[in-house]
Amino acid sequence: MLYFSAIHFLIMRSRSELLEVFSTFLQFEADRPQSWAADGRLRRNMQLALQQLPSPTAEHRSDRFWALYWHKAWQKNPTPTTPRNLPLEHLSAYLQETCYWSIHRMRSQFTNTQYGVSDCFQIAITRVQKILQGFDSSQGFALTNYARTLFSTTLRDALRQQQEVDICSTWALLRKTSQKRLTEALTQAGFSPLTIQHYCLLWQTFKALYVPTQATGTRQLPRPDDHTWQSILTEYQTQSIAEGLPPLNQAEAIPASAIATQANSATATSFAEPSNQRAANPIESKTLTPAAIEQSLNRCAQALRNYLTPNLISLNSPKSDDDRGEWQDTLADEEAEVSLLAELIVQEDYQARLEQYQVLENVLKTAIADCNEEVRSILQLYYGKSATQQQIAQQLGIQQYTISRRLTKAKEQLLKALVLWQASTMHHSPTPALLQTTGQLLDDWLYQYYRSQSEVLPV
Amino acid sequence: MLLSTYPIPDGSAQWSLTAGYQQSPDRWTAYLNQLAKAAIQPLLTEWFAPVPVRSIGSPAAQESQWSCVTGTPLRVGADRWLLLPTEQIDEDGIAIPQEWIDLPEWAVQAIVAVEVNPDEAQTRILGYTTPAQVKAKGQYHSSDRTYELAQNDWITDFAVFQLLQTEQLFPIQSESQTIPSATIPSAIAPLEIAQARALIQRLAPLPQPRLAIPFQTWAAFIQNPGWRQKFHCQRQTGELPRSIAQSISQWLTSGVQSAQDLLENSGLAGTGWDLIAPAPIAVRGPARSTPRLSKPLSIQGQPFELRLQSIAPQTWQFELHPAAGATIPPGYILRLLTEDLQPFEGNESIASQAVSMLYITVELEPGDALFWEIEPEPEAVDRELIQIE
């Protein structure tokens, strides 16, 4: 599928040549998509793969065929010992446009985000590995469908969270995190497992004992007063004994990365410690003070903020081209691999997948046609115009809850039709995880379907 | 697709509804639960119509539960759905308190995680799951006694969740699963009255009561609605509910308090009980000079009245009266149970044939409290402990 728009055509050319699709990466300039940067190695690898096909037809020069091929290649060896994971990189290249349009659409729904287009792209493109892990071609959907849902939800979550985090005080932010997120952020910041255990327990205690005392304005939750700090300290000590946590000793150093980021923090207390004090960790049972635990929670908040900042190192650059030697060494192995896979693809899956996709389209189109007119107009507004439930409610003069119900019922019908059909083509009975994915894919399919119907130019 | 938001109607009213909580953290818990309920109960009502979606228990019973642990159970047809409010803005993992997974009497069939944003007066449904899924995929944290279920294991689409439930595609809880910290048997061993009373005093002032004692003991404690109510009262007001005997005695001597105040002090406000002044003319039975408690009930669609009155010092009588001119059908039973839900001699009055009333007389010691029950079960009543003496 090619995406064009009057505005973007001038800036970003959509790719059409097969070799280009699987070997180039989007480059941004002044936060706009500007050009495609080529990776020579990937291009050569793609050429090589093409040459291995016994009898190439038009189908074999299609994007979808090669997406399937590289996905299978990746599945065969997801964590190779070679420095480069070529199937992964081919698919990262392939998914550049999908990623761009996903984030473009999602970003437009967040009007006051400080994340630029390039930032959003970076946030989303990190998900390629997860996409490949989760993609199951036998479900009947294309890789691009699946990728779109993951790119979109990743960015949606990041933008939502960033919006909230930006306007939250440290103490409000600590209340608004999950333990898993906190653990991830602390791990990324380089804290030891024992420190993380202690910090999590401290955080739990903080949350349990210190709450807002008014109905709204919770984002400005102020610093706890000294009396509250003392209560938190006492309860934290009680709980860490009850949990049998070994105390943190003085040898437990704060990781250097944590100190570096703390220096950038505008909200944390001063961490400009002289180097001979760096080894001291505030949570050391014998000398534990309210000030120490306050400092620790400030560290937690800082770790959370850093976690949400996009990785400024571009993951999206093509690799340098000076590994020619290595490439030649592995050439023989790759040839054998490629030829085997080509056979497999040609014999088994590709035709079946293409046909499957057609049938899936028909199943869903039939199911939509079976819905009544009101439901169809709700679907059209929700998926075609990206209207919110509230907006649709206003437009149609119905309660939001009723809109919600109609949408849910419609989705149930479509899902049932889809699941019934899938059951006949897949080899295992559906699991909750699989149906969760199906639900997301259905959402994406509906979006594409209604958009292609209603608009020539993307929003 | 953006997750749909559901507005909270009249958030400030919800805040004032929680004014009865003296402990700020408990008040905050109650507040978040009220907000989630206000936004999501109407939504579920719409989705499940015509099957009704109702609160479980009286407001007082729900409030006492929030002093113990977060979560709002709703009745959806024959099932119980748990609304679980959370303030977190990420969905990496959502924590479910152990009570909702391992306490058999509190079992629910579905859990809905609701992100509550009081500042924006908005809620979002983060996902749906079942306790079996939580046991199969969740990670247990002993430090706060929660099961944490990762983002990928929640179902975000209601349509998908419904399909999974109707097709029975969720994992079935296997008996061999054990919790990392302790094996929870299917029946929780009951507590003795003296133990429970001591726990009320010990736990009420603690910052995190639910973590202070082993889960088994805590479960047995909170599963008794009478003890939970007393704990809630002690924790939020600093004292236990006044007994009926004390309240009435004070009313008769000082005469200053209103009937409403009396009911509140005894923890019976808003539970349907009324305090009736002595009737000048005996309508049924001998003339009574002491005030009586009266509660209207509906049993199998017919109106009834439950009465409680002192007929002699430390001697009390429970009476079940039908509407004027009607009789109590044969097979009806009025039953009393001790504070620890045990029967005792003479605790039942059975209608072997149609009768004009059922009654049970009991002699009590100071400190005694009783549960009452009726068979067939009256509509919309909780199990209720009355602190009589």
Image: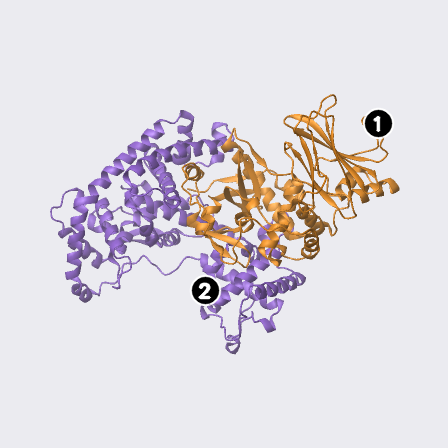
Secondary element at image label 1: loop
Residue at 29 percent across and 34 percent down: it is A361
Q: Chain of mark 2?
A: A
Quadrant for the N terminus of chain A in the image: top left
**Circle number at residue B33:** none
Which one of the lettered chains is coloured purple? Answer: A
Query: In the rendered view, does B253 fall on the left or right side of B209?
Result: right
Residue drawn at point x = 50 percent, y = 67 percent? A195
Residue A189 is marked as 2
Which amino acid lies under the numbered mark 1 shown in the image of this protein?
Ala
**Co-location on one chain, circles 1 and 2:** no
Q: Secondary structure at mark 2?
A: loop
Residue B269: x %, y % from top left:
73, 39
Q: Is residue B38 left or right of residue B90?
A: right
Instruction: Pick out the residue farthest to the bottom.
Output: A276
Q: Which chain is orange?
A: B
Q: Quadrant of residue B353?
A: top right
What chain letter is assigned to the residue under label 1? B
Q: Quadrant of the C terminus of chain A?
A: top left
Q: CA distance from mark 1 to mark 2?
A: 79 Å
Within-10-Å neighbours for mark 1: few <14, some 14–19, many 20+: few
Question: Considering only vertical position in the picture, is B114 above or below A86?
Answer: above
In the picture of the structure, the residue carrying the numbered disc 1 is B282
Between marks 1 and 2 in the image, the one whose residue lies nearer the viewer: 1
Residue placed at 38% from the left, 40% from the top?
A: A439
| Residue A115 shows up from this direction | yes
Residue B359 lies, with reference to residue B85, above or below; the image says above
- Residue A417: which quarter of the image? top left
Residue closest to the eye, A369 or B333 = B333
Res A216 seen here? no
